[in-house]
Amino acid sequence: MCIRDSSVPHFPPPSLTRIIRAFRMFKSTDVRLLEAVIDHLVAQGKNKVVMLDILELLRIIGHPDTPVPKNTEVFMHLCYDIFTDQSRLRARDMCLVTSDLNLFAKKDDVTIPALDLMMKLVDVFCDRMVYLMSIGVLSLTHAEIMEDICRTLKHESEALDRLKAKRREVNRDGDEEYYNLLDIDVRESFFKIQFVDNYNTYGPFRPIPGLLQVDFKQALSSIRVDNILEAVHLYEQAYPKQLRITLKRLLSKVVLMKFSKEGEEIIEGGEYIMKPNPRIYATQELVTTMAKVLVKCPLKRVKRNPAPWEFLLEKATIIGDTKVIDLCQKMLKYLASAKESGATQAALEKETDNDHDGESVTEFEEPEEFRTI
């Protein structure tokens, strides 16, 4: 097999994904071919493997007609390492994976160690759903689907009990109360960010398509900047340090344009026009929320730009919030001194696609009071 051939110097992820998808679409039961692909992914390691490849393989081995590969246990170890390490996994994916594991568990040749790893994965997913529900970003349908699949698996655990208890808690207050925890614009922005961040770009092999970038910017054009920042903050809570650098740059551009006096660039009638930014009235909730999200903002270009802090200072002055006024004045003073020394620009220029969080901060570190709230 060419996949096993160690003389192949490079195998681009998009090509590998097409091969795996072809296995599933044509319902291939060639177990030797499947084992070769598993060996290839295991050799890549959890940090380099593409999530979509793992999800496709799970669907293949879960099919009733597919024989159990000899290296299934090794593959389950890889799945466990990936799914417990990468908080990028969405609720929908967790339900699909659990469903595939349910089908796979019914096969006679599955080893006990492999089954144990599968059940541990299910517990990881249950705890993950409890957390996503606690911050208000989990669709309650996904929690119900997970409970149903676990019932079919006859799986009982403390993690599943925690998920059931959290769902009962929501039931007592009412589903509508749960969905009202977040502003609808914040919720919509969150899921738009999640969609683009999970778009299958294969990292540097295929950047975010230009049309998707235009659609994303256009979709955010009708949403207030404070709601976008709150959605970014929420996304960082749900998926810590998973926001891709390309999306960080795109979001930073959108947010800073909404703070600019020139307005925001949008498409109207097939042409680019400058849309004036809407007036945002000062409220205590606005000031408090913006102070929180700016201090913890994962978009370094936004956090290190004076415009958001000047905006917040103006609103805090109207409200008379002395604590936030003091915070803004200190941050603006610090940014001014950093600009004079060239530290801000040096830090931003040091951004590379190899940085996990997208932006190096070794040359520009805010004081501790600006990094915590």
Image (spheres, helix red, strand yellow):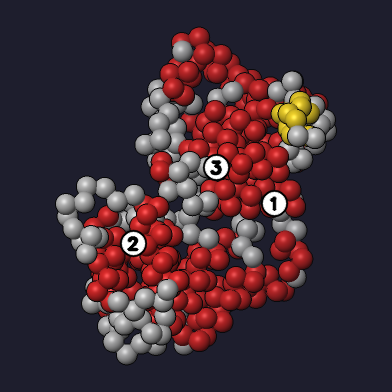
Q: Amino acid at mark 1?
A: Glu
Can residue 23 be seen from the camera position used here?
Answer: yes
Q: Residue 140's image quarter?
A: bottom right
The x and y percentages for residue 125 are 47, 68
Query: Sequence-wise, which precedes: disc 1 or disc 3?
Result: 1
Can residue 158 be seen from the camera position used here?
Answer: no
Question: Tag 1's secondary structure?
Answer: helix
Q: Residue at x 59, y 23 (%)?
A: 305
Residue 207: which disc?
A: none
> Circles 1 and 3: CB distance less than 8 Å?
no
List the residue tagged with mark 1: 188
Q: Residue at x 48, y 18 (%)?
A: 345
Residue 81: which disc?
A: 2
Q: Residue at x 29, y 60 (%)?
A: 41
Q: Residue at x 55, y 66 (%)?
A: 92
Label 3 packing within 10 angstroms: few (<14), some (14-19), many (20+): few
Q: Residue 283's image quarter?
A: top right
Q: Which quarter of the rendering shows the N terminus?
A: bottom left
Residue 209: which disc?
A: 3
